Amino acid sequence: MLAKSLLSATIKDLSALLAEVRAALPVPITGVVSDGQGPIRKAVARTLPGVPLQLCHFHYLREAAKPISEADRHAKKELKKRVRGVRPLEREAEGEDDPEAEIVRGYCAAVRAALTDDGLPPLAGAGLVLHERLSAISASLDRVAQQAGHLPKGLKKLRGLLSRGLEETAALWPPVRAAFKWVKRVSRLLHNQDNLPAVQVRRRLSAILTRIRQAAKEAKEPAVGEQLQRFVKVTKSYWPGLFACYDSKDIPRTNNDLEHLFGSHRYHERRASGRKRASPGLVVVGSVRMVAGLATRLRPDEGLKLPSGYVERWRRVRAELAPRRQARCLQRRFRHDPVTFLRSLEDKALQLTLPP
């Protein structure tokens, strides 16, 4: 594994990093999995010609469905704004032990569980999920009222709260649902449970895009048409890198596992250090910390076995990290006392103008 902190994400810097990876690996590279950034694509094409580049399906869908997810988030915010008032009902039922209070607490717990479940875009559709769950709770209260003839005071208030919120936001959900169904459809195709070859997946996705274009033209809501047009546009930009995973089982569809690996390291570092955030030093010396931390976690019984001749490599890495560490020190000094830091630089600059 190779981890490095780059000063910039230019094609030149990324190409040098990929060349170092290629030289370090004892086996040929069969594929590369990455996000959709342009410099990464060009660096892979320049440094690893002929190696297929798989673009992460998760990042593709998140980028393509971004305006759809924003519309879903907006509708969810408006619905949550109108369903405030559950906590007073919970307080009224807290001190009671009768069956009626227990039922009120149960319904309030269901509403609170629906309100606090945020989900993960682009596939979760947290707003649609919230709408469906609150609609189910409201329908349950309607059935109780119809069969029992009346509702307890707490449930009656809760029913009115939910009904009012659902009615006032009713116009927001059909456009979100109409756009979201295409995202789910593309996601199911890319998941490829039938193990179709890349040619068939490409052909079917092309057919779905044709239908999305038609749906964008026929959309009654202008916002839905714009969202679907953006989905098609982003898909075109990702198109060359969406299908390599279907030709080789060794190439994953996403790079989520790798990102989870980095996130896991940050989590363990926070737990060990007591910090709320990962240490800023991880950015500077991540090329050492990441590899050492993952090696000891993956093989705890063996420990970290150092190969022969590691001292020279260790010194070379320290020499590479020294400029970055010095730069961080300068930044920290400026944040601590900007006036003194700038005055020191001014004095040094003026000394250059003095005669020797």
Image: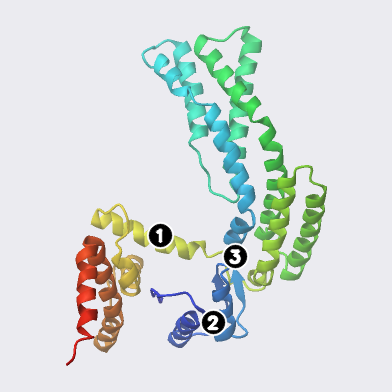
Residue 268 found in image quarter:
bottom left
Query: Is residue 308 visible in this depiction of the protein?
Result: no
Q: Look at the numbered disc 1 and give the secondary structure of its residue.
A: helix
Distance between mark 2 and mark 3 Cα atoms: 16 Å
Q: Look at the numbered disc 3 and give the secondary structure of its residue.
A: loop
Residue under circle 3? 253
Residue 134 found in image quarter:
top right
Q: Look at the numbered disc 2 and give the secondary structure of its residue.
A: loop
Q: Position of residue 76 (x, y in %)?
A: 57, 37
In the image, what residue occupies the spot 22% across and 66% down? 333
Q: Position of residue 239 (x, y in %)?
A: 69, 68
Residue under circle 2? 29
Residue under circle 1? 263
Residue type of the residue flagged with mark 1: Gly
Quadrant the C terminus occupies? bottom left
Compared with residue 126, is residue 67 higher up or lower down, i.e. above or below?
Answer: below
Residue 39 found in image quarter:
bottom right
Residue type of the residue flagged with mark 3: Arg
Front residue (pair 98, 272): 272
Front residue (pair 227, 191): 227
Compared with residue 218, is residue 103 higher up or lower down, i.e. above or below?
Answer: above
Distance between mark 2 and mark 1 Cα atoms: 25 Å
User: Pointer 3: residues within 10 angstroms few (<14), some, or many (20+)?
Assistant: many
Q: In the image, 199: left or right of 260?
A: right
Q: Earlier in the sequence, mark 2 or mark 3?
A: 2
State if disc 3 and disc 1 touch (CB < 8 Å).
no
Q: Nearer the viewer, mark 2 or mark 1?
A: 1
Q: Position of residue 132 (x, y in %)?
A: 62, 33
Q: Position of residue 152 (x, y in %)?
A: 53, 9
Query: Is residue 11 visible in this depiction of the protein?
Result: yes
